[in-house]
Amino acid sequence: MGRIKRKYEAGAATAYVSRKRALKKLQLSLADFRRLCILKGIYPHEPKHRKKVEKGSTAIKTYYFRKDIQFLLHEPIINKFRNFKVYTRKLKKAIDKGEDGQAKRLRQNKPKYKLDHIVKERYPSFVDAVRDLDDCLCLVFLFATLPRQQSAKFQTIQKCRRLSVEFLHYLIAAKALRKVFVSIKGIYYQAEIMGQTVTWVVPHARGFQKPTDVDFKVMSIFIEFYLSMLGFINYRLYSSLNISYPPQLELPADKHNSLRDMSAEERIEEMLAAMTQSLVPGLKSIDQAEVDEFPATGDEESGISEEIRKEQQSRSRLLKLFCNTKFFLGRETPRESLTFILRNFGAKVSWDPSVSAGATYLESDETITHQIVDRNQPPAKKYMNRYYVQPQWVYDCVNARNLLDVKDYLVGVVLPPHLSPFIEEGEDDYVPPERVQLLNRAEDEEMEMEEEIQSDEDGIENDDDEELKNSSEEDDGVDMASNEEAESGYEAEPEQPNKKLSVSAGVHEKVDYNKLQQKQKAEEKRLAEMMIPKKNKRLYNKIMYSKKKKAQEVRQLTEKRKQHDATQKSKRKLKKN
């Protein structure tokens, strides 16, 4: 007789464990269990068959995988949590008894733990860590902008600021920035690191109001892990570029006396945060790798290699976007964001020394090409050899991968719409007129580049053809002379008189081939719809409904844009009158 299978002894009932049982098994408090799960990356799961897991109970519980809880049993940090509880109990007892010496010794021997082994455990390879960098950067940059408060420790805010500045310096050295977009929430950046696309948002530098619906205790646990993770990533990224870590600067003499009251360590921190100087390279020399070129064998491979070549050309143009340009930033502009972007693409940046440390030249410098002003009027003293533009010009140039016309971004001019580079329109999507202009301009530039390449190739071919032509002219002259002698021996035949021919005019039948083709396609579509099986008919109807809804939205947006353009045109006419 086989073994009797009993209920709830196999399957989903044994694969999950409730939070209450997990706490009892690990012998931890709820706060310590939550901290441990966040650090280890273990989260609750919703069972597929909740009734089986709950064994007929109707109580709402939080469930975890049993394997995850068993995995936590061997974590060495649990002992550190217990040691910390003992430490707090001893410290409280010493303070209550008035034993100041004992309390001081306990504070000096406060138990600490490291998260190095957890970072290595969660991310076995470096590419995995870079791929999961989005949330880490968003939270680190958020904490770096927080003021000094009880919810976030000052040491944590200071460390977030230091690591975020180090990460921005790496992006400047590697020229890894690709896209940028200014929104109400903050400034979105997208960079390419080790072949991985990383996107994060940096809050605007505004006054901070602490939200009431945010649990800063939970966020502080996340930031504790992310700081360890970002520290490892920064070290590995700096090593890949042969830059010494922690970053070091070759500090020049302080021309403007803006750092005279600071210590050497504070001066380095201020100059690093300014991001106007390059970093000191490491001791080892790394050879630059060159891309190998292989001849394409088929049509598909040749098409792919052509696309790769075009992408490399556009990327090289983007990296040299602001080369040979000098910018001066006004005191009202977002200085850190503009400095980071402009330095990424080869520009030199400075500002007034009274604004912040790190200014490399003054406003009176005659070599400045662009001055960024975020006011309705330019400064009182104007220079004729530079452009006065608004900050949006820099962001739009990066997204367009080209230097846009300055006249649309002059001081006091109504700016064009700031389009998001993260949206890729499809065939049936609404495309703003400004995006259409940018796409047409990009296509024209690609055509010009292809024509230049083709003209160079044709020039080489023409040189070879001229040599062949010169060598064959002598032979052609001899053949022509012999042919003329032979033709002169024959007599010309008498011409026959022309006969009058008459043709009756016919009636031309006008056929609209486009209309016929559309009619034929509509008929084929109708027949295909009739042949759809009944079980797939509902899905097809849903797809067609969504397409019609999308087309309706596109029509509405187009009408709105026409009305907006008409109102703007009428306003301009009224201003002129």
Image (cartoon, rainbow, N blue to C red):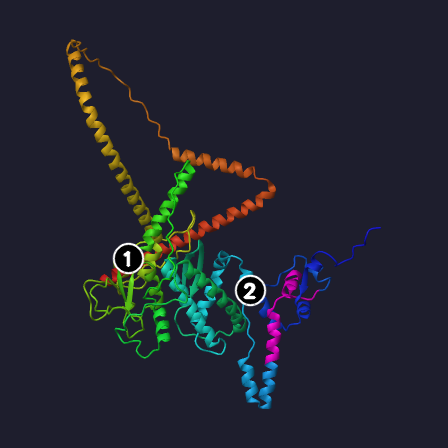
Q: Earlier in the sequence, mark 2 or mark 1?
A: 2
Q: Amino acid at mark 2?
A: Ile
> In the image, which residues are magenta?
58-87
Residue designated by label 2: 118
560 is higher (above) or lower (below) than 61: above
Residue 334 in view (yes/no): no
Q: With respect to residue 309, does 343 lie above or below?
A: below
Secondary structure of residue under mark 2: helix
Q: Return the x and y of residue 397 as percentages of the image width and height.
A: 32, 57
Q: Is residue 406 visible?
A: yes
**Crowding near pointer 1: few (<14 within 10 Å), some, many (20+)?**
some
In the rendered structure, the answer to whether residue 209 lies left or right of residue 38 reads left
Q: Nearer the viewer, residue 388 or 557?
A: 388
Q: Quadrant of the rendered structure where residue 491 is?
A: top left
Q: Which one is in front, 388 or 414?
A: 388
The span from disc 2 to disc 1 (Cα, nearest Å) is 43 Å
Q: Can you tell which of label 2 and label 1 is closer to the viewer?
A: 2
Which residue is labeled 1 in the image?
323
Q: Which mark is residue 125?
A: none
